[in-house]
Image (cartoon, rainbow, N blue to C red):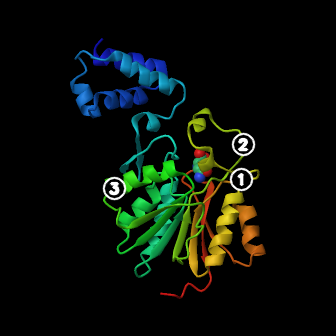
Amino acid sequence: MTIKEALKQGGKALQNGKEARILLSHHLGIDSLQLILKENEVLKNPDDYFGLIRRAQADEPIEYITQSASFYARDFFIQKGALIPRPETEILVDKVVQLAQTLHKPTIAEIGVGSGIISCLIALLVDDVSITATDISQEAILVAKINAKRFGVEDKITFIHTPYLIDIQEKFDIIVSNPPYIADDAKVENNLSYEPDIALFGGQVGDEVLKNIIDIAAYHDNCYLCCEMGYDQKEPLSKYFKTKGLGEADFYKDLAGFDRGFTLTIGENNRK
Ligand code: GLN
């Protein structure tokens, strides 16, 4: 079977020519241009390639199969055990970077670092930043460390295996998080079953982890809190800020127009 024929067959099986091409590029270790140049060559190991196709047919996300996820125009390492980056999280990165650039030697904490996309980008885009990144999952921290190394920012990020900011005494200028915020019993798509539940599901209502993070940030005082959230959480969180006497947050929407996150100023923020 030639590469061209394998591609046709794989594309038909997945009803997705693009994914079939990505998987074949990955299988052969070549880019898509080389794939076209070699399309009349014989595919040496079709069983392995169609093994990948079968995994994708079973709804395994393509990112886990290829161990690669694109975020903010960069190629991050990913594997099972860490949430796959979502494009909307680029907005959260932008919010933090904009704030951090107004501060002198900013200190930042990320709660739930996952694959490390947020901390790595902040480290890449902000001068003189120092980041403390936590996760409850050792598997996630492993992935994040690989990415920090890949992008040469391991000196700027301290990884700590702990929930929230438990046992961390330091105060931070900015606390950032893309926490689990989906309700435990929400009906979700099949491919989410491959991703870690603790990165996705935030409790019975869904906003429980977010509320805990808000409490922690309030306790830290004098900081900015930037979080991603669910499309239907603006109202309950606004109420929560009021009850806690935290004032108003700046909510932002994602590119599809859904409410997706907020920045909250806590305390005077006059330490710098
Ligand atoms: N936005 C993700 C999704 O809907 C969820 C990410 C999260 O819970 N932090 O799949």
> Which of pointers 1 and 3 lies earlier in the amino acid sequence?
3
- Mark number, residue 186: 2
Judge depth for marks 1 and 3 and give the one in front. Answer: 3
What is the x, y in percent for residue 174? 52, 73
Residue lying at 68% horizontally and 65% vertically, measured from the top left: 212
Secondary structure beneath label 2: loop
What is the x, y in percent for residue 202? 68, 52
What is the x, y in percent for residue 196? 58, 43
Q: Is residue 250 above or below residue 112?
A: below
Q: How far apart are marks 1 and 2 (CA)?
A: 9 Å
Secondary structure beneath label 3: helix
Tag 1 and tag 3, C-beta contact below 8 Å: no
Judge depth for marks 3 and 2 and give the one in front. Answer: 3
Residue lying at 48% horizontally and 71% vertically, measured from the top left: 108
Which quarter of the picture shows residue 231?
A: bottom right
**Kind of residue indicated by mark 1:** Gly
What is the x, y in percent for residue 210? 66, 61
Tag 1 and tag 2, C-beta contact below 8 Å: yes
